[in-house]
Image (cartoon, rainbow, N blue to C red):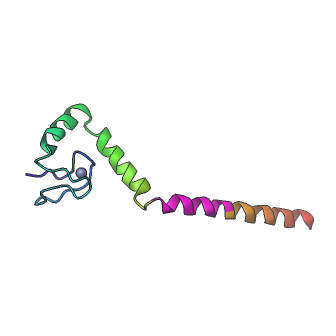
Amino acid sequence: MSPEVCPHCGADVPRNAKACRECGADEKTGWSESAHASNLNLPDEDFDYGNFVKAEFGAGGLKPAGLHWLWWLTAVILVVLFLIFCLH
Ligand SMILES: [Zn+2]
């Protein structure tokens, strides 16, 4: 039987799946043993960290760069508006 959540990467694993779609872990590579070790050592912390990473960087890294560019544009617009306001 496959676990509902991969103990290696925290990804959702379909019940009939023979291997994890994300990291490729399966019964042969011993995700059952890893699940026991993970439950004993790090019950929730490891799982939450995996979800956090996926939520933050799931877009492929394009979002932070776009956000950075947008902040620079906003800063320039604010400076220009401030200069125009002062000159009048
Ligand atoms: Zn996995």
In depth, the one of 43 and 9 nearer the eye is: 9
The residue under the point 33% across, 45% down is 48
User: Which residue lies at the image location 20% right of the left edge and 55% below the top edge?
Assistant: 20
The image position of residue 45, as x and y in percent, is 32, 39
Query: What main secondary structure does the magenta stretch of the protein show?
Result: helix
Farthest top residue in view: 41
Q: Is residue 58 left or right of residue 18?
A: right
Residue 71 is covered by the magenta coloring: yes
Circle count: 0
- Image position of 22 (left or right of 4): right
Residue shown at the point (39%, 50%) measured from the top left: 53
Residue drawn at x 27%, y 49% as measured from the top left: 10
- Judging depth in this view, the residue of 72 and 45 nearest the camera is 72
Q: Position of residue 57 (x, y in %)?
A: 43, 55
Image coordinates of residue 65 in percent, x first then y, are 55, 60
Front in this rendered view, residue 3 or 87: 3
Residue 54 location, quadrant: bottom left
Dividing the picture into quarters, in which one does residue 13 lie?
Answer: bottom left
Q: Residue furthest left?
A: 1
**At which x and y percent is residue 63?**
50, 62
The quarter of the image holding the C terminus is bottom right
Q: Which segment did they paint magenta?
A: 61-72
